Image: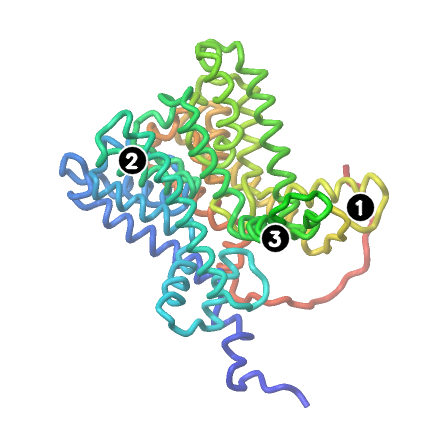
Amino acid sequence: MAEDSTAPGRAEIHSPASFNPARTLVLGFVGAILAGTVLLSLPAAAQDGRPVSILDALFTATSAVCVTGLTVVDTASTWSPFGQLVIALLIQGGGLGIMTGSLLVAALLGKRITIRDRLVVQQALGESGTGDVARLFRGVAVTVLGIEAVGMILLFFRGLADMPPARAAYMAFFHSISAFNNAGFDLTGSSLAMYSGDPMVNLVVAGLVLAGSLGFLVLGDMGRWLASLPGDLDPAQRPDIRMVSIQTRLVLLVTGLVMALTWLAVTALEWSNPATLGALSLRSKVLAPVFHAVAGRTAGFFTVDPAAMRSGSLLVTMLAMFIGGAPASTAGGIKTTTLGVLLATAAAIFAGREDVNLLQRRIAREVVMRALAVVLLLSGLVLATSFLLMVSEDARFLEALFEAVSAASTTGLTLGLTPQLSALGKLAVAVTMFVGRLGPVTLIYALARRQQRKIGVRYSEAKIMVG
């Protein structure tokens, strides 16, 4: 007997036509952007009391919600404290995910979490299964707010040396949120260039950026593993690192590899460049490449202006931005796990293996296909945006490509093109940030009429030469 698909309790879970988690997530981000646009268009949001244009408010709200950091107007001199607070809240909301935040509030208030809520959260964080999401996000709240609070305290005490306590607290509050969420918004007007030789600022901001780019799941996994370490530090009794999930190990491995290669390339190429590292003190010359390797791939903060870097350094930076951070993190890009899967796939092809193996595990075929789709779609987005910017702004290829990669990966670095964008250019970059933040695959699912697997005609196999 066929099952009754209209039985109570089944329609909500198995009827994708009536509910699409990805579409709900997209609508949540759109709602936050529109609300931010309205608030930033108010006279109270502007430093001089004269409201900015709707387009500039829309661009800024999109950049904040999408935790990118590209700005068409200077954050410090254009926005009032109210406007800056709105931006900080948009960054925080975008980093956690709009629907994630609403679920967390419901959990803290003791309200019932529905299956629909859980599906939305899984879409936001890449979770599978319908476990205790409320408990997961209570842990997320403690983790996120705890890390930001530690960063805020450290930046506050460092700021006391340069400014009054109230100003130091305000600056620490804004920049800790911006750093952890990999947004890159700053209130200095020149990012962190003035602190290129300051170990405290470099290490704290880089630490916040790195924590945000690793993602909630990786941080939680590592936290549980570290908590299981014995107090006597006897190597024979330490838990095996293989107890950590395969995803966490892959994220840490690829993240470390990307940062190491970026640091090595920037140090070698910029060491004698008088426009970047060449003019700095020895301490700054050591700190700046490290900071760039951490923040330059996922956040818009910089201590050395990328516009002054050599072409080789810019290419390495674009590759690092395109890769981005971990899934379920505040970073963008194709994600570190995607790169790991693609490298493992290439290794399997070269070795003549049918299975794709990674860290002594076999990778499912659908995961490989999804990784390829993400790379192709994000590459297409970058190329389309680059072309539009070259046409609408008459931008040089490198400038347009760098801007497109930065927007699509929600990084926020620019070679100076963003403040000069025309109306069409602003719209193009805003759309790119939006698609890059949610992910091409998520957006496609959101626009689809039905989110279910369809079994159609299976054709005979064709032999096609590639490569």
In the rendering, at what x and y percent does residue 425 appear?
38, 35
Using the rendered image of the protein, determine whether residue 414 is visible from the camera's viewpoint. no
Alpha carbon separation for disc pair 3 and 1: 52 Å
Q: Report whether 44 appears left or right of 94.
A: left
Q: Nearer the viewer, mark 3 or mark 1?
A: 3
Outermost residue, right direction?
A: 352
Q: Tell me which corner region of the image, top left, top right, bottom left or bottom right, holds residue 73.
A: top left
In the rendering, at what x and y percent does residue 409 appear?
50, 39
**Residue placed under numbered mark 1 in the picture:** 464
The one nearer the camera, 298 or 161, is 161
Using the rendered image of the protein, determine whether residue 208 is visible from the camera's viewpoint. yes
SS at mark 2?
A: helix
Sooner in the amino-acid sequence: mark 3 or mark 2: 2
Q: Amino acid at mark 1?
A: Ile
Q: Which mark is residue 228?
A: 3
The one nearer the camera, 293 or 241, is 241
Q: Amino acid at mark 2?
A: Met
**Residue placed under numbered mark 2 in the picture:** 171
In the rendering, at what x and y percent does residue 387 appear?
49, 33
Tell me if residue 391 comes above or below residue 7 in the rendering.
above
Q: Report whether 454 appears left or right of 349.
A: left
Q: Amino acid at mark 3?
A: Ser
Outermost residue, front direction?
A: 232
Determine whether label 3 and label 1 are within 8 Å by CB: no
Quadrant that contains the C terminus: top right
Q: Tell me which corner region of the image, top left, top right, bottom left or bottom right, holds residue 69.
A: top left
Determine whether label 1 and label 2 are within 8 Å by CB: no
Which residue is pictured at 72% across the width and 56% down the height? 364
Sooner in the amino-acid sequence: mark 1 or mark 2: 2
Quadrant that contains the N terminus: bottom right
Alpha carbon separation for disc pair 3 and 2: 36 Å
Sooner in the amino-acid sequence: mark 3 or mark 1: 3
